[in-house]
Structures are given as C-alpha cells and as structure tokens.
Image (cartoon, rainbow, N blue to C red):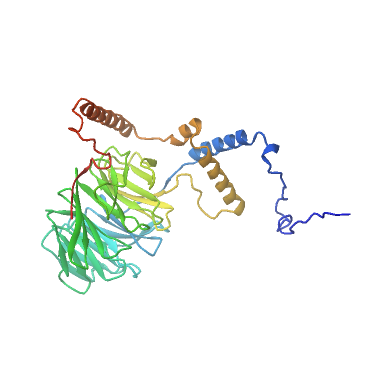
Amino acid sequence: MKIKTISRSFEEHTRPRAHDLKRMHRNLAPEEHPFERPREYIRALNATKLERLFAKPFMAALTGHRDGVYCMAKHPTQLTALASGSADGEIRLWSLQQQETRWSAIGHRGFVRGVCFVPNTPSSMVSVGDDKVVRLWDGASEEPTETYTHNSPFTGVDHHRWDPVFATSASQVDVWDHNRAEPIMSLSWGAETITSVKFNQTETNVIASSGSDRTITLYDIRTSQPISKVVLALRSNAIAWNPMEAYMFTVANEDHNLYTFDMRNLTISTKIYKDHVSAVLDLDYSPTGQQIVSGSYDRSIRIFDVKNGTSRDIYSTKRMQKIFCVKYTMDSKFVLSGSDDGNIRLWKAEADAKLGALAPREEAAFEYKKALKERYKYMPQLKAIDKQRQIPKAIVNAKKTKDAIVRGQSRRERNNIRNSAPGTVPEVHKRKKHIVAVRQ
C-alpha cells in the first residue's frame, strides 16, 4: 500500500509574529475564479480614482530671492544641497531637508546666468553672470575664493564630473582650470552666442552646446575641436545628457517641443516630446534616465516618460510665473522649479506618492494596484480618469489653437503631395522636419 503525506514548509504556513494576520491559503486555479477579471477591473478602476483623488504634487515653496530665479544646480553626491541664482545677482545655497537658506551672497552685478557645484566638495560652487566674471565660492564665506574675468557676458556654466575643470558659454565655449587665470581651451564653430553648455557625465571628454544660430554642436576636449553639429529650424534653449545612455541627449526648443538625439547619428531625432504650448526654457533628466522634466514659458512643468512622446503629468499653480529652470533631485523622488516670481517650488515626481517609510504589506498593496492599472490602462473608463488634470484655462485655449494650426499644416502638406506629380514633392519624416542641416 502506497501512502502520500502532506509536506508543508513551516515558514510559509506560520505567522512570523503573534500579532500578524493569519495566512490565508487560496486555490489559484483559474476555473475556480470565474469572476476574477471583472473583480480586478473594479479594483483597477478604484485604484485609478484614488490616485487622482490623492494627487497633491506641490510640497513647499523656498522663498528668499527678491527677483526671478534664472538658474539652479543640484549637488552630484548630496541629496539635500541646492544652489540657485537670481536676476539681482544673489546666489543662495539651500537645504532641502530644512527648506531654508544655508548661505547667500551677492555674487554678480546683474543676472546670474549659471551656477554649478564642484564635485567631491561639500559646498563649493562656480557661478557666472552678465558682468563677464566667473567666481568660485566655498559655500561658507561671502567672498569668492577665486575670480576669473572674460571679455563677453556669460550665458551658462557646467563642471567636469571629476577633474578641476569647468566649461562656460559666452561668445564661444571656454574650458577653464581652477588653477589658471585664463581659459585652457576655446571652442567655437560659427555661432555668435552660445546659449548653453553641458558636459557629458559618462563620456566626460564630450561637451554639447546650443547656439543663437539654431545649432547644436558637439566638441571633444581631447582634440580641442568640434565633432559635429546639427542646425534646427528654431533655437534651442537648454541641453541635458541622459545619465544612463552616454550617447543620448535632449534639447529644449523654441518650437514648444523637446528633441532627443543620438550623437552618433544627428540626421534624425530619436524621439519628439510634445504638449507644451510655448517655448521650452529648461529640462533635466532623472538620475535613472527614465523621466524628463521640462519647464516652459507657458508657466507649466511637464514630466515625460522617456519612451512616451506625451507628458504623463503637468504641474502648475495660479501664482507661478514663467519657468526658467527645472531640476530632478538625486533620488528621483522630487522635482524643483525656479520661476520669474522669485520662488523655488518643490514638487513630488509622482503626484500621488506617499512620503515616508512604507510597511511591507503597504508596499505590496501599492505594487499590486500599480500592476492592475498597468494591465487595464487601455480601458476607456480608466484612460479617461487617468488623463484628467486641472489645467489652467489659458493653456487649454492655447492647446486648442495650436492643434488646429497643426492639423491645417498637415492637411496642406498631404494635399500638396497628393496633387503633385509623383516624386516632385518628397514626404519628409516627422522626426526630420525640424532638422535643417547636419555638418561634420
């Protein structure tokens, strides 16, 4: 006679602590649960409704600047350190944890056009302004530790990831060493004014810049020469490198869009991000490389998934003015914005995210709801609820006008191709329309 015994793991069928809930053993066979899909749909619907109900992204406003905030910088290794510069020449060092100013100084006469932290230091910074001066600060004294002069007003600055080297943008791209009074290298390729400059944080010898002549230029500081450049239809205001993909970068353009390029092939943009209704003034990648935040002249902040061309969220307030700078925090949980009203605002990166530590059961419940919403996200009712946002009326009206213009342009292009002789009017891909020329 053959006898089968029931074998059970003691850990899987016993409560770890006496006050924990008793473990429930369920039969997961699909035939035993004929109403599983309707039940999951209702749960996904309720989870989506609760997400929109508790979506309160605004956290705090950092006040102290007396004029508009035009530049910001986050520390590469400290989560709570933030530097900002305003139009009245003031530079401030903030503690995001305490939400207060740790240090401030009048750094320039006129606008502060750029500020960046020096890596591997607790609070050292480099700042540039309209007064043609570069200043190096230690974050403790109100007097700069070093001062460098130039013959042109500056428009931006960025620091090398490890070396004591930083790059500035003015009439040309200049590379400076902390221990030299003059630039160790000057780079240019036709532009009258360089509007922004960024070091690649992975391939640290590569610099990208945008110019007033609508160009985006790549330089290699090892050869002291430009690599290539692309000419767009309109001017670009800011550049950001993807921290996880060394060859990818995104630009914020005057035509209300963001364009992502692969530096190995500049003849076509790999992605176009739409939804803004005015010029995009700044952008930043999350440290994970999966999200992009952008700030626009239309007084709104939009967050994009890298793989999706439309924004997943929009942030705006009644008192917020034009957004001149945006940043992701180094933990990817918060977004910072600096606007023309003199405030720095702190937002959640996920509007419905719960702050603080989560219990294991609570974390499991959030993951389960997220999986349900992902499974049923294409259902009409869920899609309508998930897209619901409180958008300012001015942006809604501008969006309608812009959509009508775009539809009219597309219709005219199709009619022109249809009514012309075959081959006389080429059909241009959407990702190539904004590109005028590429030069090596």
Q: Nearer the viewer, residue 410 or 118?
A: 410
User: From this viewpoint, is residue 326 visible?
Assistant: no
Give coordinates of residue 140: x percent, y percent: 31, 69
Give the residue at the far front of this rendering: 422
The quadrant in which the N terminus is found is bottom right
Give the residue at the far bottom of this rendering: 179
Q: Residue at x 32, y 62 (%)?
A: 201
Q: Is residue 59 above or below residue 83?
A: above
Q: Residue at x 29, y 31 (%)?
A: 403
Q: Is residue 304 left or right of residue 38?
A: left
Q: Residue at x 35, y 34 (%)?
A: 392
Where residue 86 sits, quadrant-wise, is bottom left
User: From this viewpoint, is residue 8 visible?
Assistant: yes
Give coordinates of residue 375: x percent, y percent: 53, 40
Give coordinates of residue 265: x percent, y percent: 26, 52
Q: Is residue 241 left or right of residue 56?
A: left
Give coordinates of residue 341: x percent, y percent: 28, 46
The quadrant in which the C terminus is found is bottom left
Q: Nearer the viewer, residue 363 or 10?
A: 10
Q: Is residue 343 above or below residue 147?
A: above
- What is the count of numbered marks? 0
Where residue 397 sits, quadrant-wise, is top left
